[in-house]
Image (cartoon, rainbow, N blue to C red):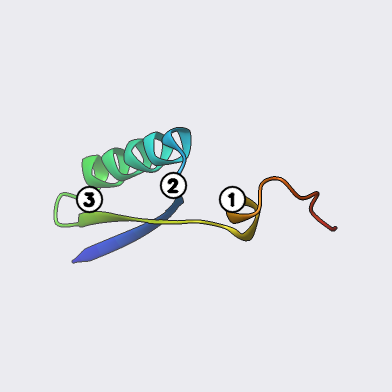
Amino acid sequence: MLLRIGSRESALAVVQAEKAAEEIKRFNKGIDTEIITMKTRGDMIADEPQES
């Protein structure tokens, strides 16, 4: 079984996703994981304030 984990592209977010993947695999030996990174709207236009 393949479990895809979504993450922002920032280094911190990827490390956190990797840690989550490690824990998932530790308790579920039959699961493979893949981290899919993405940019949010805020990542793409970081110089503009975000509306709530």
Indicate the amino acid at tag 1: Asp
In this view, the residue in front, 42 or 13, is 42
Indicate the amino acid at tag 3: Asn
Nearest to viewer (mark 3 / mark 2): 2
Residue 8 position, x and y percent, is 48, 49
Mark identifier at residue 43: 1
User: Which image quarter holds the C terminus?
Assistant: bottom right
The residue that mark 2 highlights is 9
Residue 31 position, x and y percent, is 19, 57
In the displayed orientation, state which residue is furthest to the front: 47
Residue occupying the point 80% across, 49% down: 49
Q: Locate residue 47 relative to residue 41 in the image: left or right.
A: right
Mark identifier at residue 28: 3
Q: What distance separates the C-alpha of mark 2 from that of mark 1? A: 9 Å
Q: Secondary structure at mark 2?
A: loop
Mark 2 or 1, nearer chain start:
2
